[in-house]
Image (cartoon, grey):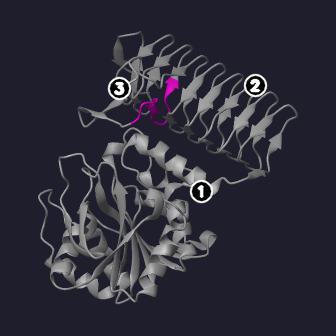
Amino acid sequence: MKGVILAAGKGERLDPLNSRRPKHILPIGGSPLIFHTIRAMQGAGINEIIIVVHHMGDQIASCLGDGSSFSVGINYVDQGRPGGTGDALRAAAPLIGSEDFLLVYGDLAFKPSSLAEMVSFWKSGKREAVIAAVRLPDASEYGAIESSSGRLLRIMEKSCLPEPGLVNAGMYVLPGHMLKYLEATPLSERGEYELTTTINIAAEDGMVFSVYELKDGGWVDVGRPWNVLEANRLLLDELVRGRSIDGTVEEGVQIRGDAVIERGATVLSGTYVEGPVWISSGCRVGPNCYLRPYTYLAQGVRVGNACEIKGSVVMERTHIGHLSYIGDSVLGMDCNIGAGTITANLRFDERNVRASMKGKMVDTGHRKLGAFLGDGVKTGINVSIYPGVKIGHSSWIGPHASVQRDIPPETMVISRAEFETRPRR
């Protein structure tokens, strides 16, 4: 069996986090997101993986190489254009041939054991094809699964009504002869070839798709900025069990709960770590900091004196100045956070935080949610950033500013309410 990962999409809804690299290699839960999928495939017994790329595909290939570091072989195929999931699978078809294959969307986070369990389910029942499904409290944003006695009848279009249901999880075990149905797949209303349409055509033609429901709902579609935090939480729960302390931890540091501190990381005296927490190589934390549960510091992050970080993802080489608070936020790489910067994570009325998405304000479903900063953002001293605010890459926020709405990329905020475009140099 071969593995196929679809990683060609741009993921526009993840802005501003993916402005300089594809969403599939954003660091989440200890490593780039796609690493988790490759390791799960390897754990399911797959040693040959095909990755379909397009948007910033060279970065994905550079990050993963030939797969030898994962004990698998990786081949890449460029989709050539943004043509939908069915079109992406068509691009991979020559490399798949007639073999059975395990197909996974490349922007998912899930329990590492899920793929092995799904393949075992396929093998044990000698099933023709398997589609994974997950039960969600709000199924309106995904293709709903209609089934009978564990057999797929069809994948339905997204509903506008927010209600519980079983949805397509974007993980499949498929036979090679499934590929013939790609040629019969029409363009969707969005002008793309959808894999879900292909599956419906195959099911109508008599192919049996067994529905495999993922256990305990351990699944996140990383499509929006706050999904990065949800995925990080899921993965840290799975991967940080016990303590793995290989870095330098000074006397006077207290660690409560599970934690990973990689070799080359330094945690200075007076710091209190409450796990699960992941501190990567090259990080320097403290003195006198408080790292709260579900904090992940990627490589080379520096956290200054007396900072508090709660449930946040801080990407590579970002510096957080002393006396700052980062709560339930995602900070891109190479940011410089001035002393006393505060990311507010709770509305004054304690309602769910709302955030802008393609010009519309949406309910994130989170009562506590902070800010989302693109790569290279700089803040001056004593900056306050409101819940759900997004700041575009390379923007500068001047001292004492109160940021209450989204900031475009490469913008300078020079006072509490005045904006001007920073001149390029």
Q: How far across and how far down the image is residue 392, in percent? A: 39, 32
From this view, report whether residue 405 is shown above or below residue 209: above
Find the distance from the CA under tag 2 to the CA under tag 1.
28 Å
The residue wearing badge 2 is 288
Image quadrant of residue 35?
bottom right
Residue type at mark 1: give it. Glu
Residue at image mark 1: 238
The answer to whether residue 29 is visible is yes
Which portion, as a residue range, is magenta?
366-378
User: Residue sitting at 51 percent across and 35 percent down?
Assistant: 331
Residue 406: mark in rendering:
3
Q: Residue furthest right?
A: 251
Q: How far from the left and from the top, in percent, is residue 36?
A: 54, 61
Q: Give the amino acid type for the residue marked by disc 3 in the picture.
A: Asp
Magenta stretch, overall SS: loop
Instruction: Give the quarter of the figure containing the N terminus.
Output: bottom left
Please check the rendered image and state whether residue 368 is part of the magenta-colored stretch, yes or no: yes
Q: Secondary structure at mark 2?
A: loop
